[in-house]
Amino acid sequence: MASPVTPTPLLKDELDIVIPTIRNLDFLEMWRPFFQPYHLIIVQDGDPSKVIKVPQGFDYELYNRNDINKILGPKASCISFKDSACRCFGYMVSKKKYIFTIDDDCFVAKDPSGEDINALEQHIKNLLSPSTPYFFNTLYDPYREGADFVRGYPFSLREGVPTAVSHGLWLNIPDYDAPTQLVKPRERNTRFVDAVMTIPRGTLFPMCGMNLAFDRELIGPAMYFGLMGDGQPIGRYDDMWAGWCMKVICDHLGLGVKTGLPYIWHSKASNPFVNLKKEYKGIYWQEELIPFFQTTSLPKECTTVQSCYKELSKQVKAKLGKVDDYFNKLADAMLTWIEAWDELNPSTQLQNGK
Ligand SMILES: O=c1ccn([C@@H]2O[C@H](COP(=O)(O)OP(=O)(O)O[C@H]3OC[C@H](O)[C@H](O)[C@H]3O)[C@@H](O)[C@H]2O)c(=O)[nH]1
Ligand SMILES: [Mn+2]
């Protein structure tokens, strides 16, 4: 009797898993059944002389700060140090169409039936099915098995648009800001919501980098996680900044962003006092940043992610430079990022990421 053929994991040779880390990578043992077939890109932050042990059997490349400096030269200045924002270097050096990024304190969660959740498989499903940013489907993801568009949903919109980003969530430790963490230190997220939905066009959202996947060819150059951490006045706004820039560009280019399933189990609460020191400026700056992104418009001549991003950098400098000089530096770093991206990925300067 022939042994059952194990199905080839979806996108096995078209997806890289990017992990920022300052710790050991034992968490991979729990993910082995789901991650082992895939190539890992490990971005080691902090002291490059520290040896990061990768469990046996994983196919990976590892970059520390010395490697980043060697590969990018002066352009390495745009890659953050001592902040998880460094993960975006992994997006830049990857050669694959898709990226899944996960933190090293995120583990396999269980769904209400007690089954292990293959977060990677769900992200791939999210990315391979269209999004519906122009009209909200009240039964959530219409492309999901057992669901569809509801009555009154325009047939002209049922084809949907390509999905650029899949934003997953977290059981146990929720991704709260420091003030919320301080007032609710024991709060845990126990609610499993069985839904995936498209974030409507024109709506921003707080993108968390903990459990995130995206189509690198559609939106990769917009996934810059900014200037954070060492030497910078702000931290823990890396993924937020990337999410706002990305969403404005996705809306402009007609691409979709989904949030919801899959869940991971977030195991470690970082120190709220340390977090407060990192993020406090962001808490009041964002009251000006959000209106900026909500009112930003990109000219129709911007038809590639790179051209959109360069235009966004110009507007950041013009309109946010007066909030704080940091945004002038960030606007310049956005341009450096795109230059570095194009140097490492010469073939991606195409129309609309196609
Ligand atoms: O200096 C650093 C600190 C951490 N990392 C790596 O980044 C991942 C997240 O670190 P950690 O789990 O300690 O922080 P959280 O507060 O849970 O992270 C959330 O908020 C900040 C970021 O937006 C992050 O994406 C969120 O998940 C982890 O893999 C650390 O090893 C680092 O590279 N450099
Ligand atoms: Mn964490």
Image: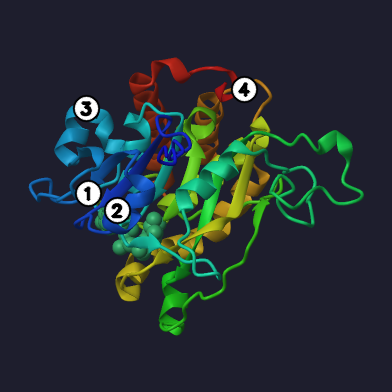
Determine whether label 2 and label 1 are within 8 Å by CB. yes
Ligand 2 visible in quadrant = bottom left
The vertical placement of 119 against 59, above or below, is below
Residue occupying image coordinates x 82% and y 37%: 157
Q: Position of residue 326 (x, y in %)?
A: 39, 48
Q: Which residue is mark 4?
A: 303
The residues tagged by marks 2 and 1 sit, at their Cα atoms, a distance apart of 7 Å
The residues tagged by marks 2 and 3 sit, at their Cα atoms, a distance apart of 19 Å
Quick check: 222 left or right of 254? left
Residue occupying image coordinates x 7% and y 47%: 49
Q: Nearer the viewer, mark 2 or mark 1?
A: 1
Q: Residues within 10 Å of mark 2 (few under 14, many from 20)?
A: many
Q: Is mark 2 within 8 Å of ligand 1?
A: yes
Q: Amino acid at mark 3?
A: Ile
Q: Which residue is mark 3?
A: 71
Residue occupying image coordinates x 34% and y 20%: 343
Determine whether label 4 and label 1 are within 8 Å by CB. no
Q: Residues within 10 Å of mark 1 (few under 14, many from 20)?
A: many
Task: Answer with mark 4 or mark 2, whichever residue precedes in sequence.
Answer: 2
Is residue 118 in view?
yes
Task: Answer with mark 2 or mark 3, whichever residue precedes in sequence.
Answer: 3
The residues tagged by marks 3 and 4 sit, at their Cα atoms, a distance apart of 29 Å
